[in-house]
Image: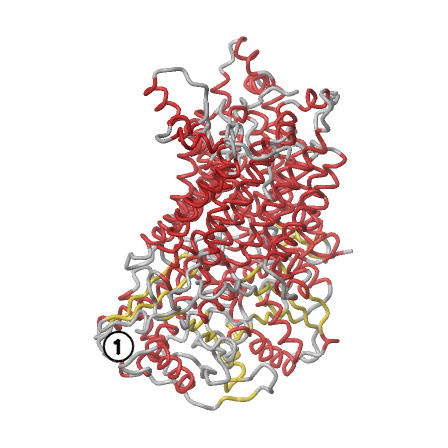
Amino acid sequence: MTLFIDLTLNGLTYGLIYAAVALGLVLIWRATRVINFAQGALATLTTYVAATLLDRSLNYWVAFAVALAAGLIFGALTERVFMRPLYGKPELNPVVVTIGLLILVESVAGAIWGSTDRGLTPAFSQLGLTVGHTYLDFSSFDIFILVSVLVLMGLMLVLFRWTSLGLKMRASAFAPEVARLLGVRVGRLLTVGWALATFAGALAGVLVAPLLLLSPNMMDPVLVYGFAAAVLGGLDSPVGALVGGVLTGLGISYIGGYLGSSMETVGAAVLLVVVLSIRPEGLFAAAKARRV
Amino acid sequence: MSRADRLPGAERLKGLQGQPLAWHIALGIVAAAVLYLVTSSVSLYDNTIISEIAWYAIAIAGLSVLTGVSGQISLGHGAFMAVGAYGAGLMMEHFRLPLIVPILVGIAVATVLGAVVGLPATRLRGPYLAGVTLALALAAQDLPTKFSSLFNGDTGIIVNQATPPGGVNPERWLAWISLFGAIVTMIVLANFMKSRYGRALKAVRDDDIAAQASGLNPNRMRVLAFALAAGTAGLSGGLFALWSGIVNPNSFSLFLSIQLLAGMVIGGAGSLVGAWWGALALVYVPQWTNSVTSHFSSVSAITANVQGAIFGLLIIVVMMAAPTGIQGWLSGGYRRLRRGRSRTELEPVLPLDLDLSSTSTAPERTRP
Amino acid sequence: MKYSIRLRGRPLAVASAIGAAALATALLVAPSSGASLRPARTPGVSKHQIVLGVTTPLSGPAAPGYDEIAPATNAVFSYVNAHGGIYGRKIKYIIKNDQYDPTLTVQYTRALVQNDHIFADLGGLGTPTQTSVQAYLNQHHVPQVFVESGCACWSKPKQYPYTFGWQPNYIVEGKILGAYIKAHYGRKRVGYLYQNDEFGQDGVKGLNREIPHRQVVATQNYEATPQGLGAGLGSQIAALQSAGAQVVALYTIPAATALALLAAAELHYHPLWVVSSVGSDPPTLTGLLSSFSKGKAGASLLDGMVTNAYLPPETFARNPWNKLAKGILRRYDPHFRWDGNSEYGFALGVTAVEALQKAGKNLTVKSFLNALERYGKSLPNPGLVPLTYSRVDHYGYSGSEVVKILRDGKLIKVLTPREITTLRGPIRVYTGGFNKIPAQFKK
C-alpha cells in the first residue's frame, strides 16, 4: 500500500510537469496549428538563465521570475522571427522549423554552458514530508510544483474565459478571418499565444531541473511525454493537457514500479493507441459531428 | 512536348523513343559507363558514403510518399528501418542465403508492420498520428533489450559483410548494391505515384469525402500508403545492416526518425529527387562540420556543438528560404530560367519531379 | 503492362531505369583489380608523426562527463610532443564527435581509416558504438585499442586480434562488489538497480555469481535510452524501499546514480549504496547533488557509499600520479576539470604513450600489438591493478579496489589489498606494487 501511495505521488509530480509542457503545446496548436518541438529546448534555455543567476547568488524568486519572463520573450521572438514568414506555406514547414530550432537551441546551450549536467537549487526542500510516522514521496518542493502548475492552469482559464484578450485570442484561433474583420489584430495575438506557451514551458523547465538535473538535452524526454500527454488529452483542450499529463505521469510511475522500466514506453504506446482508437482526437476532443 | 525535343541531336534519339526498351538500353549503357567510372574513380571512403546516401535516400523517399503525397505524418519512421534491419540481420545471422533473400524478408516484415500501424492511421490525423508513430519509435527502441535472447540486447546482431564476386572491393560492391536498391525503389515509387493508386492517394489527401464519393476507399488507401512507406524503410534498414555491419537499437533512436523527417522536408516533401538532396544533407553536414572542428587543437564546448548548431540552422534556413525544399527551389529556378530564355509561356514543368503544387495548403486555423 | 514506363511526363522513372541498367552493366564488367586493403607502409606513421584517431560523444545526451576524456588524453600527447615526442615522432590525435550514435561512429571511423590513415583507433567510447566498428577495424588491421567500455566482447584475441579493452570487465567488477557485499553484509536484504543494457546486465551477472539468490529481494532497472531517465527514478527506488532492501547495488551512469540518491533522500530511504565505478565518481556526484535541498546536502548524500576503483581515486591528493595528472592537464587542457573522467583520459593517454614507446623505434602495427601483449601487464600507468593484456586476454584492468566514500567526499579503502579476478575464475588478491612514474613523464 505504501508503494502504491509513493508511486501515485511520484507519478503526480512528474505528471504535473508533463501537463505544463502539454499546456504549452496545446496553446500553440490552438492558435497556429503547429506542434512546437522547440518548446523543450527553449525551456532548457530559460532554465539555464535561472541557473546562471542562481550561481551569481541572486534570490531564487528573482531567478524564477527572470526565467519565466525569458520564456515570454523567447516565445514571442520565435513566433515573430521564425513562424510568421511561414504561415500559408506547406503546413509541415513550421513544424520542421521548430525541429531545426530544437537542435539549434540545444547546441547553443551546450556551447555556452557545456554538456555536463548540473543540479538546480530548488525553491523548497526536496525531502519527503511525514504523515504520522510514515514518510511520503512528496516534498515541499513537490507541493510547490503542484501549486504552481495549478496556478498556471487557473491563470490561463481566467485569461481565456474572462478577459477580452482571451476572448480575442479564442476568436482568432476559431475564425481568424472573421476576427480580423471585427478589428482583432490576429497577428499580434498569435505572438501573445506563443509567448504564453513558452512561458508555460519555462515553468516546466524550472520545476523539472531539480528533479532531473540540468543539461542541454534535459527536456527531450520531458517534451516527448508532454507531447504524449497533449495528444492523449486532446490538442485543443487545456483541461485535456492537465488530465493527459497526470495520466501519463501516473501510468509511467505505476508501470516503472510494478512492471519494470522496459515496459514504460511500450505501456505508454499501448495506452496511447487504445485511447486514440476510441477517441481519435484525444479524451477531451470538442464534441462534434463527424462529417460524412 | 518532351524534353528530348530541345536537346541537340534529339531528332535521331526521337526515333528510339517509340521503342522504350531500346531507348532505355541505349541510355543505360552510357549511364552504366558513367556510374562505373564514378564508383571506381572515387575513393573507397566515398563509396561508403555513396552507400550511406543511398539508404538514407530510400528511407526518405518512402516517407516522402507517405507525408508529401498522402499527407500522413510519421514521426517513427526509424522504427520501420529497425524492423527491416533486424529482419534482414537475423536472417543473415542464422542462414546462409543469397543476399537478396534476407533483404526481401526485411522488406516484408516492415511492410506488414506498416500495414498494422496504418490501421489506426485510418482514423487519426496530423499530430495524433504523429503521437502514435512517435510512441512506436520509442517502444521499438526498448524491445531489443526486452527480448534480449532473440535480438542480443543492446549489443545487437553482427552482420557479415556482403561477399563481393572475385576482386571487387567490398566498399564498392556495397555501393553498387545500395544504388541498385535505391534505383529500384525510385522506379517503384515513381510508378506508384503515377498509377491509379497514387492519384487516388492524392485525392484522398485533398478531400477524402469527395474521394469517397467517387468510389475510393480512403481507409484502404491510407493503409496502403503506410505499408508502402514502411516497406521502403525496411529496405533501407536492410541496406543499413549491410553498411554498418551491426544492428543494434542505438542506431534507431528517435533522433533518426526526426532526421529522416527533416531530410525529407529539406529536400522537398513529395519529391523523389528531393529525397536525394535530403540524404546528401544528412550525410554531408555533420561530416563537413566535424572535419572542420576535429582539426582544432583543443576540444571546447563550442567546437563540440558547432555541428548541431549548423544542422539546426540549415533546417531553419532552407525552410524559410525555400519552403518547398531544395528540389522545389531548384525546379522553380529552372522554370524561371526557361521562361526568361524562350519568352514563351510554357506549361509548368517540374523536371524529374512529382506533383508539388498541392502540398501547399494554408494552415488550417478554423475548426471543421 | 498497365503502368509501363513511358518517357513523357515520367522522366524520373526513366532516369531510374537507366540507372538500374547502368548498374546491371557495371556489375557485369566489375573490375578484377580491387585495391588491396592496406598499403605496404604502416599507415599513420611517418618519420615525424604518429596519427591516432577516436570517435567519442562531445555533444548530445551521452556527452556529459564523457566529453572530458578525449581532451585529457590529448593533453598527455601534447605534453609528450612538447618533450620530444616518441622516438622523435609527435602524436596527432584526431577527435571526432560521434554523439554516441553508431551510425556516426561507422561513418567517422571509416573516415579516420580511409581518409586520415590513422595508425590506431585509441579510446573509442561506448559498447554499442565500438562494436559497430570492431569487425571493420580488424579487417583493415587497424588497432582498436583501449576501448572505453567493460564489455566482455573486447577480449576475443582469435576473432579480433586488433581489439583491446580498457575498463575492468563489468562482470569482473560485479563479482568483486558482490564478494564484498557477501562478506560484509551476508545477512542483509539486497536490491539491484541497473541500466538495462550490456553494462548493467553484465554487472548484475557478476553480482549474482557471488551473492546468493535468496538474499536478493528486488531488482529494478531503467532503460539506457534518453527516455529512460525522463521520469526520474522515483518509482524504482520506491519499489526497492518497499521490498525492504538494506543494501542497494547500483549499475548506473553518474546522472542515474544522482537521480537514485535524490529519490531515496526524498523517501528518507538510506540503504547502503554499493555503486559500480562507472557511476560513482565523487566530484561528479557532489557537483550533481550540491544543489539538493537548497544546498544543504550534496556530499553528505554520498556518505558511506561503497564503490570500486581501478584508478587512484582523484581525491587522493598525495598520489604521485594524481599530482602529475593535475600538472599536465592544467597546462595542456584549457578546459580541464579534475574529476574521474579527466583522470581516466589521462591514464589512457599515459598507457598509450608507454605502449608506443615499448613498440620501439621501428613502429608497426605488429610491433605495437606485440608490445601490448608482451608488456601490457607491466606498462607503467596510474592503475591500481595491472592490465590483463596477453596473447589470450585483451580485457582492460584486471580488477579493482573497493573503497568507501566519506562525508567530505574523501575515500578510504575498505577492502585491501586489491582484488583481481577473471570472468570464471576465483577472486584473488593482488599483492604487486604501484606503478612508478616512468622517465618519460619526469621531465
| Mark 1, other Cα within 10 Å: few <14 / some 14–19 / many ≥20 | many
Q: Could you tell me residue C265's position as x and y percent?
A: 60, 59
Is residue A211 at all visible to an observer of this figure? yes
Residue located 78% across and 56% down the image: A1
Residue at the disc numbered 1: C86
Q: Secondary structure at mark 1?
A: loop
- Residue farthest along the top direction in this orientation: A182
Residue located 69% across and 75% down the image: C188
Q: Amino acid at mark 1?
A: Ile
- Left or right of B188, for residue C21: left
Task: Please name whichever residue, A138 or C167, is drawn nearer the observer in this view of the structure.
Answer: C167
Is residue A202 at all visible to an observer of this figure? no
Q: Could you tell me residue B153's position as x and y percent?
A: 62, 63
Task: Please name whichever residue, B360 or C148, is drawn nearer the observer in this view of the structure.
Answer: B360
- Left or right of B206, for residue A205: left
Q: Could you tell me residue A134's position as x and y percent?
A: 72, 57
- Left or right of C86, for residue C164: right
Chain for mark 1?
Answer: C
The C terminus of chain B, quarter of image: top right
Q: Could you tell me residue B261's position as x and y percent?
A: 52, 40
Q: Quadrant of residue B361?
A: top right
